Amino acid sequence: MGNQIRTTILLAVMTAFILWIGQLLGGQQGMVIALLLAAGMNFFSYWYSDKIVLRMYRAHEINAQQAPEVYAMVRSLTQRAGLPMPKVYVIPQETPNAFATGRNPEHAVVAVTEGLLKIMDREQVMGVLAHELAHVKNRDILIGSIAATMAGAVMMLATMARWSAIFGVGGSDDDEGGLGGLGLIVMSILAPIAAVVIQMAISRSREYLADATGASFVGHSEGLAQALEKLGAYSKRLPMQANPSTAHMFIVNPLSGKSLTSLFSTHPPLEERIARLRGVRPASPSNGSSPDHRQAKGRAFWDNLQNK
C-alpha cells in the first residue's frame, strides 16, 4: 500500500508541474494542452516507461545461452527472494552501473553495464544483482520508472519554456494566466530542480532498504559493499553518459563525477551505505585478495561470458 500511495503522489505532483508549465506557456489553453499531455504521459509511464528507459541506453536483452553465468546468478537470487525470473539486459557502456525497471515483479527487468561485468568479480556482481532484485521485491521499480519518464517530460517542457522566453513566444501576462517572459525564465530554472528534489525524496530512503534486502538474498553484505566501493571510484573517474531524469534508477549516481549535478544527488552517500552494510566497521577488503586480483578475476569472468 505504501508504494501505491507514493506512486499516486508522484503522478499528482509531476502532473501539477506539467499543468503549471502549460499555463505559463499558453495560459488556459496551454493548461488544457498540458493536461492532455500529462494524461498521455501517465498512461505511457505505467505501461511503457521500462521500454523507454531501456531504449534510451541502447540496452539489449541476453539469455541463458548468451550469458550463462549472469543468468544463473539472477535465477538463483530470484529463487531465494521468491520472485519471478526477470528479463536481463546489458547496457553498452564502460562505466560500471546497474538498474532495475518494470511495472511489477512479473514484468521486471534488470540491466547492468558491460563495464560492471568487466571490473567486478562474481561476489560483487551477485551483490549488485541482489540490490536490483531487492528493488523489484520492495516494488520500487514502478515508481522509479514513472519518475524517470515524468521528470524527463518536465525537463523537456522547461527547455521549451526557456526558448519561448528567449524568442518572446507564449507566457503572455494576460487574463489567461501567463506570467510573461520573466516567469518563463524563472520556471525553466526551478522546474527541473524541483523534479530532481522529488526524485531525491523518493529514492534516497529506498536505497538503504534495497542494500539491506539485497544482502539478505545473498546471505552476506561484503560483496555488495565491495561493489559499491568500486562503483563510487569509477563513477568519479568515468562518469556515465546518462540522462539526469533517470539518475535515481541506478545503483549509484551515474552523474557523480559532474559537480553541478552532484549537488542534487538522488542517492545517499556511498560511505554511509557501505558503513551500514559493514556494521559501521572500517572499510577494508575482507577476503585477503588485492583489488587488482579481484579486477583480474572480473575481467576473466567477462571474457569467459563473451566466449560462451
Image (cartoon, rainbow, N blue to C red):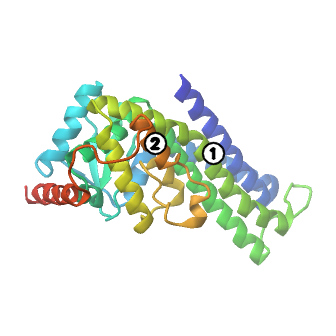
List the single residue furthest toward the left: 308
Q: Nearer the viewer, residue 29 or 56?
A: 56
- First in residue order: circle 2 vs circle 1: 1
Q: Quadrant of the C terminus?
A: bottom left
Q: Quadrant of residue 286?
A: top left
Secondary structure under the numbered disc 1 in the rendered image: helix
- What's the amino acid at mark 1? Ile
List the single residue furthest toward the top: 1
Q: Which numbered circle lies on residue 198?
A: 1
Front of the two marks 2 and 1: 2
Q: Is residue 12 left or right of residue 245?
A: right
Residue ID for mark 2: 273
Residue 269 horizontal/vertical position (percent): 52, 48
Which residue is located at x 78 percent, y 63 percent? 186
Does the rendering let one see residue 146? yes
Please, is residue 218 above or below residue 284 in the view?
Answer: above
Q: Is residue 308 left or right of residue 37?
A: left
Rate crowding at label 1 as few (under 14), some (14 to 19) or many (20 or more) other CA atoms within 10 Å.
some
Q: Is residue 35 left or right of residue 210?
A: right
- What's the amino acid at mark 2? Arg
Does the rendering let one see residue 97? no
Q: Nearer the viewer, residue 233 or 72?
A: 233
Which residue is located at x 45 percent, y 37 percent? 280
Number of on-image labels: 2
Residue 104 horizontal/vertical position (percent): 40, 33
